[in-house]
Image (cartoon, grey):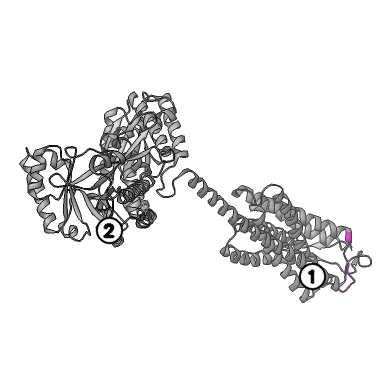
């Protein structure tokens, strides 16, 4: 037998090609498994070519490394056939390992098919030598080479399937697996080569017209390495691009989720907004229509929130709203919906079997809201008014239910606040009337429907007149003279009290300037400040500008604030009142005795007078308790060197008693009713001429 030898450089080249081919195969399998649609088919075709070329190149370079003492060559056509076999078996292998599962039966069958294909490729390549006489094979080594091919193919399929997913750990394991697979492929090839026996006198039929140059083997090595490298680099770059795309897709999906959440939820409280509320309300209606039962729709509006917002700022107001929202949510059963539909308005959808269950939930909500809230460094208290509409019964459509619950809420607010009311048909008309009144109120200033009446203030017991208190009246074109009790609360609730209050201040100063020009410069005019107006950031500047506009002496203006307003935030009140007194205006504490004043703070207020609430004066002669309170207030005022004004004097007995106690000024129907500016001048003063 002819004895062969090997070119060691080409043997090394063949092993390198085998390892690189194995690693590329592992990487491409992972790339194919993550692709979809047409991309997967393109990756499968390209991967089969790259992998098949790598396996074939390893075998062909290995055969070119083999030398006999006779000229050798390889038939191009038969060699090309072996390449096609390598590509076909590569396509089969990649298709197998990219399936969703690889059960052991499929693994065994795949190993047998791929092993037979590898053996067929190898021995077809050997046949390309066209030896005469033909190559003889050692049966044992031949069978061993086929078994090695089958076992190596099975191991390759299993490792490729297990390592097809990405990750840093997978890449390390792929390299180790590539070394094992390369060694197995090389082992199969060289076992097959050792099985080949060449009888003496053998001639290679392809020696003259076939491949035989060692440099050709090197060229195949370079081309194969280049193809595998390009395939590997393309796979890595595409994987990175896909990873970035996946990250961007995840980011976009997350952003869409956030946008969807923001579109359906209130940003401040995290509660459902009006859009999601309408959907939940429709679901609740359909559920009751389908399964029966009932639910309650509650409209919740906070009492006094606007005052807190104006007094302490929006940041504190937002903290208060967030805390109240969480309390309402915690007070409700888990399946109920709590939504925020406005600044301080919430809506609750609660599954309730009857009105008594709804009343229990409303009571629970009121208790949770009225507890003190610590926000912005302040202890704040608000209450709530709740309107309840039941379904079915109080409306068929969601708009009707919401409107009716809203009407019930306004009724609860008008009834004293911090309460709940169930809807009744008459409330809808009342609500419509109030909404119309609000629309008219918004236009009242522009239409010059607001007027000031003036109630005289007398030096005790009966004069002379020391000035007047400006009292706001609304001369409605259809309703006539609207009482303050009907529109002032509405103006305070909507914030219209601030521009209205500014107008009142300007008109009172204008009138006082007119009276001063008429010779009554010793008079003063008192203007009431609402809590919203008192906390408004531009109050001091507004007062200063108004005094300058009408050239009025600041001492002629008295600003009246209620005791509760002054004591709501004492430090802020002190700072604001000091700025006002620096302008030269006087400060009167109105409704004194109705709040919970601290004498420690009261003595620090830069006030010039205390005004006794009419509630203490009305029952003064018959109620010794009221008499004791008034006596204490007068004594307190005298101790603090403050003027004492008693309002609501309606009887001579009250007049006499208050005068004896030491009140400085009296005000009431007994002495003079509120009247227009012209009537006031006609009744209490005549024009004076200056010398």
Q: Can residue 442 be seen in this snapshot?
A: yes
The quarter of the rendered structure image containing the N terminus is bottom right
* Label 2 Cα crowd, 10 Å radius (few <14 / some 14-19 / many 20+): many
**Residue at the image point whose x is 40% and y is 25% from the top:** 395
Name which of mark 2 and mark 1 comes first in the sequence.
1
Where residue 356 sits, quadrant-wise, is: top left
Residue 117 counted in the magenta span? no
Residue beneath disc 1 = 222
Mark 1 lies on a secondary structure that is helix
Residue 66 counted in the magenta span? yes
Mark 2 lies on a secondary structure that is helix
Q: Nearer the viewer, residue 151 or 310?
A: 310
Residue 554 located left or right of residue 12: left
Q: Which mark is residue 609?
A: none
Q: Nearer the viewer, residue 390 or 108?
A: 390
* Residue contact at pointers 2 and 1, CB within 8 angstroms: no
Q: Nearer the viewer, residue 584 or 366?
A: 584
Outermost residue on the front side: it is 691
**Residue 629: image location, x then y, percent:** 10, 47
Residue 2 located left or right of residue 376: right
| Foreground label between 2 and 1 | 2
In the image, is residue 99 above or below residue 26?
Answer: above
The quarter of the rendered structure image containing the C terminus is bottom left
**Residue at the image point whose x is 81% and y is 58% from the top:** 83
**Residue 327: image location, x then y, percent:** 31, 46
Residue beneath disc 2 = 577
Q: Can residue 326 be seen in this snapshot?
A: no
- Assign the magenta stretch its main secondary structure: loop
In the rendered structure, which segment of residues is drawn in magenta? 65-76
In the image, is residue 218 above or below residue 569?
Answer: below
Q: Nearer the viewer, residue 690 or 125?
A: 690
């Amino acid at each position: 037998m002819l004895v062969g030898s090997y070119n060691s450089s080409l043997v090394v080249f063949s092993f390198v090609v085998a390892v690189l081919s194995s690693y590329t195969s592992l990487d491409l399998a992972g790339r194919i498994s993550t692709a979809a649609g047409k991309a997967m088919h393109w990756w499968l075709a390209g991967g089969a070519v790259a992998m098949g070329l790598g396996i074939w190149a390893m075998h062909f370079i290995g055969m070119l490394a083999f030398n006999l003492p006779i000229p050798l060559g390889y038939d191009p056509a038969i060699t090309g056939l072996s390449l096609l076999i390598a590509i076909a078996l590569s396509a089969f292998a990649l298709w197998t390992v990219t399936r969703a599962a690889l059960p052991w039966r499929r693994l065994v069958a795949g190993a047998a098919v791929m092993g037979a294909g590898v053996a067929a490729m190898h021995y077809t390549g050997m046949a390309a030598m066209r030896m005469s006489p033909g190559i003889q094979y050692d049966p044992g080594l031949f069978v061993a080479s086929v078994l090695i091919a089958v076992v190596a193919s099975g191991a390759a399929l299993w490792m490729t399937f297990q390592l097809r997913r990405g990750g840093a750990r997978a890449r390390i394991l792929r390299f180790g697996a590539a070394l094992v697979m390369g060694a197995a492929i090389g082992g199969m090839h060289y076992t097959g080569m050792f099985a080949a026996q060449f009888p003496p006198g053998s001639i290679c039929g392809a020696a003259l017209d076939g491949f035989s140059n060692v440099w050709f083997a090197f060229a195949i090595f370079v081309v194969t390495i280049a193809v595998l490298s390009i395939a590997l680099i393309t796979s890595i770059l595409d994987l990175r691009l896909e990873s970035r795309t996946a990250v961007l897709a995840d980011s976009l999906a997350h952003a869409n989720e956030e946008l969807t959440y923001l579109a359906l939820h209130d940003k401040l409280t995290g509660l459902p907004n009006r859009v999601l509320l309408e959907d939940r309300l429709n679901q609740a209606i359909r559920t009751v229509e389908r399964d029966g039962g009932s639910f309650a729709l509650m409209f919740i509006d906070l009492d006094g929130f606007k005052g807190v917002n104006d007094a302490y700022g929006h940041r504190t107001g937002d903290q208060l709203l967030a805390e109240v929202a969480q309390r309402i949510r915690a007070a409700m059963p888990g399946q109920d919906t709590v939504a925020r539909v406005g600044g301080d308005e919430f809506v609750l959808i609660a599954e309730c079997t009857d009105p008594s269950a709804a009343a229990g939930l409303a009571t629970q909500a009121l208790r949770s809201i009225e507890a003190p809230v610590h926000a912005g460094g302040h202890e704040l208290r608000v209450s709530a008014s709740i309107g309840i509409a039941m379904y079915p019964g109080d409306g068929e459509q969601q708009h009707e239910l919401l409107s009716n619950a809203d009407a019930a809420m306004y009724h609860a607010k008008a009834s004293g606040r911090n309460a709940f009311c169930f809807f009744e048909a008459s409330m809808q008309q009342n609500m419509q009337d109030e909404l119309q009144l609000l629309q008219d109120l918004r236009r009242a200033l522009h239409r010059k429907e607001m007027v000031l009446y003036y109630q005289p203030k007398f030096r005790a017991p009966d004069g002379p007149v020391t000035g007047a208190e400006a009292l706001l009246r609304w001369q409605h074109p259809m309703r006539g003279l609207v009482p303050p009790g009907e529109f002032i609360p509405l103006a305070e609730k909507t914030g219209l009290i601030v521009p209205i209050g500014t107008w009142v201040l300007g008109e009172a100063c204008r009138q006082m300037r007119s009276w001063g020009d008429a010779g009554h410069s010793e008079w003063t005019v008192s203007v009431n400040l609402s809590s919203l107006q008192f906390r408004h950031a531009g109050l001091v500047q507004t007062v200063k500008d108004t005094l300058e506009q009408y050239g009025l002496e600041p001492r002629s203006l008295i600003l009246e604030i209620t005791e509760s307003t002054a004591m709501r935030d004492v430090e802020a009140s002190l700072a604001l009142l000091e700025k006002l007194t620096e302008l030269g205006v006087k400060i009167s504490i109105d409704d004194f005795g109705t709040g919970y004043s601290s004498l420690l703070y009261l003595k620090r207020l830069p006030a010039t007078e205390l005004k006794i609430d009419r509630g203490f004066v009305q029952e003064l002669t018959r109620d010794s308790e009221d008499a004791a309170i008034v006596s204490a207030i007068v004594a307190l005022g005298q101790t603090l060197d403050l003027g004492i004004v008693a309002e609501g004097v309606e009887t001579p007995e009250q007049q006499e008693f208050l005068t004896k106690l030491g009140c400085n000024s009296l005000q009431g129907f007994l002495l003079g009713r509120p009247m227009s500016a012209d009537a006031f001048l006609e009744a209490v003063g005549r024009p004076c001429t200056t010398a």
